[in-house]
Structure formats: structure tokens, C-alpha cells
Amino acid sequence: MATCNPALEQLGGYPLARLQDLANDLRADGGPVADFSIGDPDEPTPPFIREALIDAVGPVSRYPTAAGQRALREAVAGWVRTRHGVEVDPDVHVLPSAGSKEAIFHLPLAVLDPHGPRRAVLWGDPGYPVYGRGALFAGGVSDPVTLTDQDGWRLDLDALPAERLRAACIAWVNYPHNPTGATVDLDWYRRQVATARQHGLLLASDECYQEVWFDRPAPSVLEVCDGDFTDVLAFVSLSKRSGMTGYRAGAIVGDPELIRRLRVLRPNVGTASPDFVQVAATAAWRDQTHVDARRAVFAAKRDVVLGFLKDAGIEVSGSEATFYVWFRAPGDDDAAYAEALLRERIIASPGRAFGPAGAGWLRLALVPTVQGCRDAVERWAAAIDDGRLPV
């Protein structure tokens, strides 16, 4: 038998893939299913984005370039200026990506020396598993930092031992946070940038949920750099902002030397979005109206779910932004409660799928429609009243 990359043996399957398989099994019998597992909302992509893509599909297909269309880079730079008040040069600070997941996974290939002294990648646990997985496949070490409810699910680099920081080459931060929905402010970003630079770390900020906020706009790490983006990269995406999960369209913004290095790497990987997707992405970055409308829909779903959990006496933590609601498992066993919900045809993600520190919590992705959320919490409440679910 052919040899196997040991990283595959170490990781096993992607943890959330099993939830999709379970959802498909439930749908197969034709009954109602409330799928709160994967962050892929049911609301349609705005028509103007779909039309832009269709109009851009020409009779001849060409390979896209890794640098991306200039119009797209200009659109991203324009959004950064409008949304965050930060000037970036589309030619040196911006690089389109095929969504944020692949860009996150591939970043260590451009930064991490698998034979060097700084092979670790820091990230918050619970968190997006791809941070650690990208490190392992690049020949590095995944070094998760335990996040807690008491600390507001915030990763503070200056609280880590100096030797741990010196062993790392990348520190990932992700706010608004998946899976907890926790948020941070500009002072927090300033502290992380200062600590990362003090220790020679690349601070990589995953900001794919930045437009899904409710009480106040979510800030960006780019806002605290004063025009100097050295050792700072922000990863942004249209998946959540514009309902374009299947389009695979995002961007990397920041340090010009790292952007140059990624432009060298990415043609070898071959992940550039097709030209017609880039045209659709350009249209999406240039429009804010549809983003505000989607946020209002997410807010309505959130009100339904948070209202139910409060009435049921179930503890909620974080859940300040993103379209995720993070709640403590009644009985403190997230896997058992997720299985009990499955029997009610409600699919939630056990917190341990996002790392050991997520055990005892569950994540709800506000995927169903507003009415779908209402229907689901009615079934949930009935199961509690009938004693099939604990509180």
C-alpha cells in the first residue's frame, strides 16, 4: 500500500462533515429537519450578484491569475476604506482568495519553516479547526490556546509565556468568534499587534464574520495599524457577508511582503477563483445595502432563538455577533445533548467539535429561515415540556 501523510492519520475526518451526513440521513425520510449545524444560511444570494456572475460567463474559459482581477482588488480596497476608514493599495496590500478557508489553510506554507525553531501556530480553542490543521499539513505544530467563558472567549497573547510565543510563527485570532460569537474592541487589537510584533509573530486575523454584528460594528485589526501592516494580515470573505458560500470568494489584506510571498505560493496551489466568480465578487464588495438587509434577517432569527433559550433557562455565552448562538449543554454533556436534539430532528454542533475547550457547550448556526427557527424552538420546547430533553 502507498504511504500516507501522517497528518491525515493524526486528524481523522473533518469534525463537522459528520453532522452534514446526519442531516442528509434525516432529510431522506421526508420529515422536517432543523439544521443548525453548518454555517450555510438558507437565504438566497442577492439577484444582482447572481446576474453579475451569469453575465460574466463567456464562450471561452481562461485560467484565472493568482493576483486576481484588478477591479476586484480595487473593490476590496474600497470596502476597507468605506467600512474601516483604512487606506490600502490594491496592488500591494490586497490578494483575492477562494473564500477564507483555503487561504487560512495555505498560509503556513508561505510562513512556516518546518525545519526551523519556530514551527508552532497559536489559535484559540474552541475555534475553527482549520487553523491547526493548516499548521500540521505544513509540517508545523498546532498549539491551541484554551479560551474560557470567564475570559469572554478572548485570546490574549500577552497572557502567554514568552517561550510559547517565541516557539510560534503565526498567531490566529478570530473575532467575531466562531463558534462562540464573542467580540473584541480596538484596544484588544492594539494589544495583540504590539505583543505579536514584540515577539516576531505574524498576527493573522480571521474576520469572515465581521459584517454579522448587532449592537455595534465589528472592528478590524487593520484599524489599529496606522498604515503600517507589517506582520499583520486580515482574512475577509463574502461567504457570510453576501450569502456566497458556494462561490468561494474572499481576500487577504495587509503586509505587502507577505502578500508578495503569497502571490508566489498560490499559483503552485491553483486555488484562484474563476474569472466569472471574481466579477460577481466585485459587485458584492461594492454594495452595502444587501449586507444590511441580511444582517436584519440574522437579527430576527437570533431574537427567536435567544428568546427561547432565555425562557427555557438555558445559559447562553458570547453570542454577541456572528450568526452563531453558543449555549451550555443542560447536563454539561454536549455530545449527549446533541444526540437528544437529533431525536427531535434538530441538529446542533457539539462544542467539542471545535476543540476540547468546547466540551459542555453547543453551537447553533442560524441557518434555517426565521419561520424555520420558530418551528424548531416550538419542537424543542415541546420536548422539554414532555421530559424528553433536560434543561
Image (cartoon, rainbow, N blue to C red):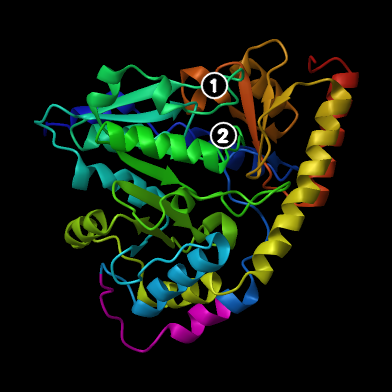
Quarter of the image for residue 33 reads top right
Residue highlighted by disc 1: 358
Residue highlighted by disc 2: 179
Q: Are marks 2 and 1 in contact (CB under 8 Å)?
A: yes
Numbered marks: total: 2
Residue 312 position within the rendered picture, expressed as x and y whole percent measured from the top left:
86, 23
Whether residue 185 is visible: yes
Quarter of the image for residue 381 reads top right
Name the residue located 58 percent from the left edge and 42 percent from the top edge: 24
Name the one closer to the observer, 228 or 247: 228
Residue 390 position within the rendered picture, expressed as x and y whole percent measured from the top left:
79, 14
Name the residue located 25 percent from the left edge and 75 percent from the top edge: 63
Q: Where's the C terminus, which quadrant?
A: top right
Q: Residues within 10 Å of mark 2 (few under 14, many from 20)?
A: many
Name the one closer to the observer, 305 or 157: 157
Residue 165 position within the rendered picture, expressed as x and y whole percent measured from the top left:
29, 25
Quarter of the image for residue 98 reads bottom left
Whether residue 130 is visible: no
Query: Which of the marked residues, 2 or 1, is nearer the chain's N terminus?
Result: 2
Task: Determine whether, in the image, residue 235 is placed left or right of residue 66.
Answer: right
Task: Determine whether, in the image, residue 112 is placed left or right of residue 315.
Answer: left
Residue segment shown in magenta: 50-65
Q: Is residue 76 above or below residue 26?
A: below
Residue 198 position within the rendered picture, expressed as x and y whole percent measured from the top left:
29, 33
Residue 149 magenta-drawn?
no
Name the one closer to the observer, 10 or 235: 235
Residue 54 magenta-drawn?
yes
Task: Determine whether, in the image, residue 144 is placed left or right of residue 63.
Answer: right
